[in-house]
Structures are given as structure tokens and as C-alpha cells.
Image: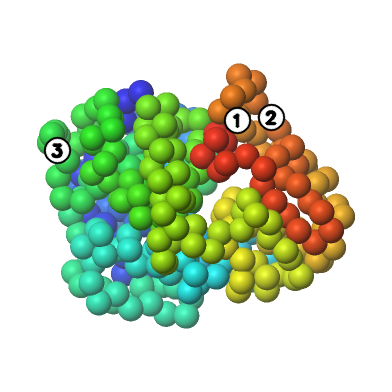
Amino acid sequence: MTMTLIKGRYQIKNFEPDGDTVHFLPDDPGFWPELPGDHRVKRDVHGGASLRLDGIDALETHYQGAGPDFVHQPLELGAHGARDALLAWLGFTDVTQGADETVTSAIPETVAGFILTGGADTYGRCVAMVGRGAPVPDARSGTVLKVDVPLLHQTANHELLSRGLVYPTFYSNLPRDLRLDMAATARQARAAKAPGSVWANDVTHSGATIEDLSSLTDDLVILPKLFRRLADYLRLFGPALDCLPAYLAGAGDEFFLSDQSTSTVGLQRVVDVHDDTVKLRPDIEDIVFVEK
């Protein structure tokens, strides 16, 4: 599979970056409409757009979902660590943020870089491999490239995954060779369980025991995809998990497992719920979600 190369600048002041989302202003915004896919990139008045880093998912720093207020995953157990690592890798220093996670100042104000993208998601975010400086080999913006593993390894996506700061979360638009390499990288990071990584405290597979919403926001490190479903459920229905399987079925997440040729619908197929404990059965990197 090929992706489109777009060069530009990363901007974070007055935006709310996290470990897998950052704002990008292309040198030429005219390339946005040329991207393939059913969804269009949602641009601001300057032609910039929000990027979703492909193949990874960072702990949530400000998730709204079903509630009127934003919630987050444990900030000191990885949510802020992934965000800070991404911004530092891109080249930002002295970053300050307000209580609402909005960046109020950073040095420099913009950093040059490039993205490799196959289009936008259903929310209008550009799904991309995120690079700094110029790619090797270099090419002009708008060039459609075959993205191979060496090029993947030039990106923040690979950097954050290799350090265990984010979870692998694969969607069907991600090329298979890149997915396999990212899966292997994630397994190595999980085995290392480096201090500060999500794997050092992860309970996605061992079991997350939930007393109330604060269990998710303050204590438990779990796959963000599962966190979002659980946070919405708890805010809608309270802490009793009796109806969680039905709720997961209604959410309708469609996915493939690595050993299956047909898709499955509903995370209740792979999530065990026993009393107040939730556990994901398959390895995270063995799940491929269908991009809507």
C-alpha cells in the first residue's frame, strides 16, 4: 500500500496535543483534497489539521465521549509521558500547558516535519505516520510513496511504540507489512516493561478491577480503546458491570483477529467480565479494527 508524502510544520501552541494526536500545517494545504478515502480531512482556517498517529493509541489525557466533562486515564502513569515524549521527539522544548491540556507556550513555535498518510478517519483527522525534518529518501510533497519498514522506523509512531509509551492499535487501512513490524515492536516493548512505559502497569490482560470511574481515571492502565468504552458505560449506567457485554455489543466495534479470515462484531466477543473485573483475552497486537 502507498501513502502520500506531505511536508509542513507541527504547531502545538493553542492546541491540545497528546501522545497520538498533534496539529500539522502543510506547506501546501492544497494536497488535503487529493487524499484517497471516503472521509475528508477537517481543516482549520489556515489549512492545518489534526493528525491521528497511525497504528498506536496513547493513554487519554482529555476524553469527552458520553459525558459533559472530559475524563482521562492515569496522567502520571503514562498519559502525560507519551505526550511529552512525542513533543520532545518532534523538537519542542519548554512546553507549558493549562489545566485543560491546551499548550500556552513552547520553543520553537513550529517544527518542520513530514507526514505519510492514506487519508482521514471518520472524525476528519488525518491518519498518518509522523516524521521530523525530511524523510530519507526525500521527495516532493504530493508524492505517492511505497512506505516500507525503514521509512516507518523514521517516524514517531515507531519511536513511541518501541519505548512502550503507547499501545499498538491497528486498523484495516494499515499495510500488513507495517502492521507486522509494529506488532513485533510492541511485543518487545511489552516484554521489556521499561519503567514509565504503559506495560509497567498494564492490566488489560491480567484484569482491571473497577469500583467506579475513578478506578479508570486514577489507577488502572488499560488499552485506551477499552477505556473509552468503559468510561462511557460507567457514566451512563454506573459501576455495576452486569450490562457491559450488551453495551459492548451495541457499540458494534468490528475487527479481525490475526488467525481469522472473517470479521467479528462487538468487543464482548473478546472481553471477559467477571463481577467487577474486565479482561481482554487476545493480545492487543492480534486485533485489527475495521476502519469505518
Spot occupied by residue 50 in the image (x, y as percentages of width and height): 39, 52
Q: Quadrant of the C terminus?
A: top right
Nearer to us of marks 1 and 2 is: 1
Residue designated by label 3:
136
Q: At numbered mark 1, what does the secondary structure look like: helix, strand or loop? A: strand
Most extreme residue toward the front is: 191
Calculate the distance from the C-alpha at mark 3 to the C-alpha at mark 1.
33 Å
Between residues 232 and 153, which one lies in front from this camera angle? Answer: 153
Q: At numbered mark 3, what does the secondary structure look like: helix, strand or loop? A: loop
Of the image marks 3 and 1, the number of the one nearer the N terminus? 3
Residue designated by label 1:
257
- Which residue is located at x 61 percent, y 71 percent? 219
- Which residue is located at x 68 percent, y 56 percent? 207
Q: Callout 1: few (<14), some (14-19), or many (20+) C-alpha neighbours within 10 Å?
A: some
Query: Looking at the image, is 43 positioned above or below residue 108?
Result: above
The amino acid marked with disc number 2 is Thr
Quarter of the rendering containing residue 117: top left
